[in-house]
Amino acid sequence: MNVSYWLGHRIFRELAHGLFDYRVVGVEKLQFSGPAIIACNHVSFLDPPMAGIAFDEKIYSFARKTLFAHPLVAKILRSWQVLAVDRDKPDTASLKTTIRLLREGHKLLMFPEGTRSHDGVVQSAEAGVGLFIAKGRAPVLPVRLFGTYEAFPRGAKFLRPAKITLVVGDLWQPDLKNAAETGKELYQSLADEVMHRINELRL
């Protein structure tokens, strides 16, 4: 864990506990070694740090390519293990990077919905996360954030009082060998199953 990542992790964790009474339900389910795709709902810009600080180890995540336009911001994001991705046109470089990181034993945070919800309600999953699951062949850890929409919804300019909780689900290893679908149908099916598991998580 580099200095920048450690510092960001520490600052966000202190802010989360101080401002939002942050807690994790099912923290014991985070204690496993090896690679995983951490799949989370997406309702706020707070989601990446609020999910990331639950892990004591370094994890990788994705952010839309446009956020890397400013050199200083890009440098900070990269030091926090954030990878640029074109949300509208996912490229092979992102897929290759994902597969490499998973094979190296790392954990990657992904948001199956692709973009933040406008109303805080869980949205349908895009097929992209299913592609990463199929090609990466790593287990999936579904997690769900509650309270980040109330704290900083889409379009808000200031933080609002709220309690933020991360609920951790059970690690899931898709049975790809016996899958009935192939290609895009398989990717969408995997994405839908991930979203279903996220949506089932409750406080």
Image (spheres, helix red, strand yellow):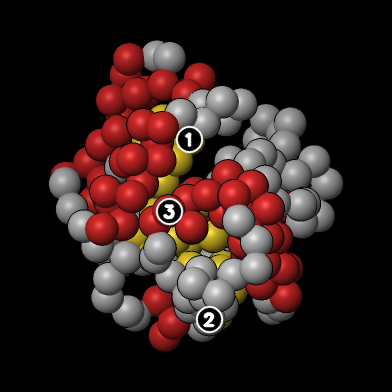
Where residue 73 sits in the image (x, y, percent)?
37, 23
What's the amino acid at mark 1?
Ala
- Residue 56's place in the image compared with 186, above or below, is below
Residue type at mark 3 is: Lys
Residue 48 position within the rendered picture, expressed as x and y whole percent measured from the top left: 49, 49
Q: Residue at x 68, y 53 (%)?
A: 185
Q: Position of residue 127 (x, y in %)?
A: 64, 47
Which amino acid, by three-letter code, is at mark 2? Answer: Asp
User: Distance between the Cα atoms at labels 3 and 1?
Assistant: 20 Å
Q: Which residue is mark 2?
A: 170
Q: Point out which mark residue 63 bears.
A: 1
Query: Distance of mark 3 from mark 2, alpha carbons?
Result: 21 Å
Q: Residue at x 16, y 46 (%)?
A: 2
Examine the rendered structure and indicate whether residue 193 appears above or below residue 13.
below
State which tag comes first along the sequence, 3 or 1. 1
Mark before the other along the chain sequence, 3 or 2: 3
The percent position of residue 178, horizontal first and vertical second, equals: 55, 75
Q: Which of label 3 and label 2 is nearer to you?
A: 3
State the residue at coordinates (28%, 25%): 75
Name the residue furthest left: 2
Q: Are marks 3 and 1 in contact (CB under 8 Å)?
A: no
Could you say which is closer to the camera, residue 119 or residue 34?
Answer: 34
| Number of other residues with Cα within 10 Å of mark 2, as a class: few under 14, some 14 to 19, many 20 or more | some
Q: Quadrant of the C terminus?
A: bottom right
Instruction: Please tell me which of labels 1 and 2 falls first in the chain.
Output: 1
Q: Nearer the viewer, mark 3 or mark 1?
A: 3
Determine whether 88 is above or below 12 in the image: above
